Image (tube, helix red, strand yellow):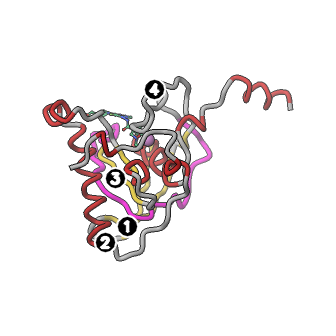
């Protein structure tokens, strides 16, 4: 099973690479890896397992975070209406998104970042995502709210982007206003 020792921390170049597409149909090895990633996220939300293995709670994890530069991630999160999104996705991509933006009021964190970084992370309010799930089916998901934000955070990992890259500092805002 995956534990925190398998999670790559910031500074490792793998977190800054653009990950490679997974060749489909996925190999048994890639399927096992993605299943292990989904199990890790689910375990991280189980008080006993998380305590026993000292797992930081998470709602998602992307393959680069376990040192694998492949375009796949797992998420396990309930949306505002209590709908559970629990899946592994190969080669996810945003096919359309709203112009309107949103953010998590408390900002974001990351299992690969062992420090608190304040600041709001702008995300699209709504996105439509296509990808291939662990059963090999192509899925199209129309997402909004927390689930949409989680997907965007994980998708960023596949492109070498960390959440704090998107935090606009005061100077950035000032520069924009002055230009
Ligand atoms: C929002 C949230 N972020 C948690 N952690 N950070 C993560 O998941 C990182 C990814 C998230 C950071 C912001 C958007 C995506 C991991 N990332 O680095 C992967 O790239 C949580 F743990 C969490 N929840 C709420 C739901 N709760 C259900 C019961 O179990 C505990 C669980 C805690 N919500
Ligand atoms: Ni992260």
Q: In front of the other: label 4 or label 3?
A: 4
**Residue at the disc numbered 4:** 115
Question: In this orientation, does residue 113 appear?
Answer: yes
Spot occupied by residue 153 in the image (x, y as percentages of width and height)? 47, 44
Callout 4 secondary element: loop
Report how many numbered discs are placed on residues in the image. 4
Callout 1 secondary element: strand
User: With respect to residue 179, does 83 lie above or below?
Assistant: below
**Residue at the disc numbered 1:** 132
State which region is magenta.
77-102
Of label 3 and label 2, which has the lower sequence position? 3
Spot occupied by residue 74 in the image (x, y as percentages of width and height)? 34, 52
Taking the image in four quarters, ligand 1 sits in the one at: top left
Give the CA distance from mark 2 to mark 1: 6 Å
Name the residue nearer the viewer: 161 or 130: 161
Give the CA distance from mark 4 to mark 3: 23 Å
At 65% from the left edge and 30% from the top edge, which residue is drawn?
168
At 52% from the left edge and 40% from the top edge, which residue is drawn?
11
**Residue at the disc numbered 2:** 136
Name the residue nearer the viewer: 54 or 92: 54
């Amino acid at each position: 099973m995956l534990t925190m020792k398998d999670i790559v921390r910031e500074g490792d170049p793998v977190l800054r690479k653009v990950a490679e597409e997974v060749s489909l149909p996925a190999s048994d090895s890639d399927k096992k890896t993605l299943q292990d990633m989904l199990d890790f996220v689910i375990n991280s939300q189980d008080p006993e397992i998380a305590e026993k293995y000292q797992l930081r709670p998470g709602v998602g994890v992307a393959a680069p975070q376990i040192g694998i530069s492949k375009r796949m991630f797992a998420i396990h999160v309930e949306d505002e209406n209590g709908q559970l999104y629990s899946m592994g996705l190969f080669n996810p991509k945003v096919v359309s998104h709203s112009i309107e933006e949103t953010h998590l009021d408390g900002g974001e964190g990351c299992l690969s970042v062992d420090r608190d970084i304040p600041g709001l992370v702008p995300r699209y309010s709504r996105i439509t995502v296509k990808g291939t799930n662990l059963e090999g089916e192509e899925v199209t998901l129309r997402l909004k709210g927390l689930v949409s934000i989680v997907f965007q955070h994980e998708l960023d990992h596949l492109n070498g982007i960390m959440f704090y890259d998107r935090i606009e500092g005061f100077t950035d805002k000032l520069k924009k206003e002055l230009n």
